Image (cartoon, rainbow, N blue to C red):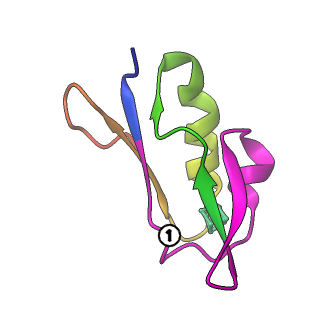
Amino acid sequence: MAKYTIKNDIDECIGCAACAAICSNWEMVEVNGDEKAKPLKTEIDDSELEDNKEAAESCPVEAIHIVDKETGKKII
Ligand code: SF4
């Protein structure tokens, strides 16, 4: 069962593609003519946490956040 929820702020995203280069859960899509990152899965488990955390850490505008579903605590 998924333990974490991924939230991404698409308005903040500057389309640098750093997250997509690091983690296969992220892909670049076109939104209204701009390149934006989008997660394939917004619900992940422990085995997917590290990669997605690295993607979030790589984001220069802190547009990616991961929340623990059980505690509601923001991991990043
Ligand atoms: S690293 Fe951040 S700014 Fe760059 S594409 Fe991913 S979400 Fe967007």
Near-viewer residue (23 or 54): 23
On screen, residue 32 above or below 53:
below
The crowding category of the residue bearing disc 1, from other C-alpha atoms within 10 Å (few below 14, some 14 to 19, many at least 20), is some
Check the picture and name the quadrant holding the N terminus.
top left
At x 74%, y 52%, the residue is 20
Near-viewer residue (75 or 7): 7
Q: How many numbered marks have been drawn onto this rendered protein structure?
A: 1
Furthest residue toward bottom: 33
On screen, residue 75 above or below 48:
below
x, y percentage for residue 32?
61, 84
x, y percentage for residue 60?
61, 68
Label 1 CB sits under 8 Å from any ligand 1 atom: no
At x 49%, y 76%, the residue is 12
On screen, residue 39 above or below 59:
above
Chain part drawn in magenta: 6-35
At x 56%, y 50%, the residue is 56
Left or right? Give the position of 44 relative to 50. Answer: left
Ligand 1 shows up in the quarter that is bottom right
- Which residue bears the numbered disc 1? 10
x, y percentage for residue 45?
47, 21
Please, what secondary structure does the residue beneath circle 1 have? loop
Magenta span has 67? no
Q: Amino acid at mark 1?
A: Ile
Give the quadrant of residue 18.
bottom right
Furthest residue toward left: 71
At x 22%, y 25%, the residue is 70
Furthest residue toward right: 21
Give the quadrant of residue 74.
top left
Left or right? Give the position of 29 relative to 43. Answer: right
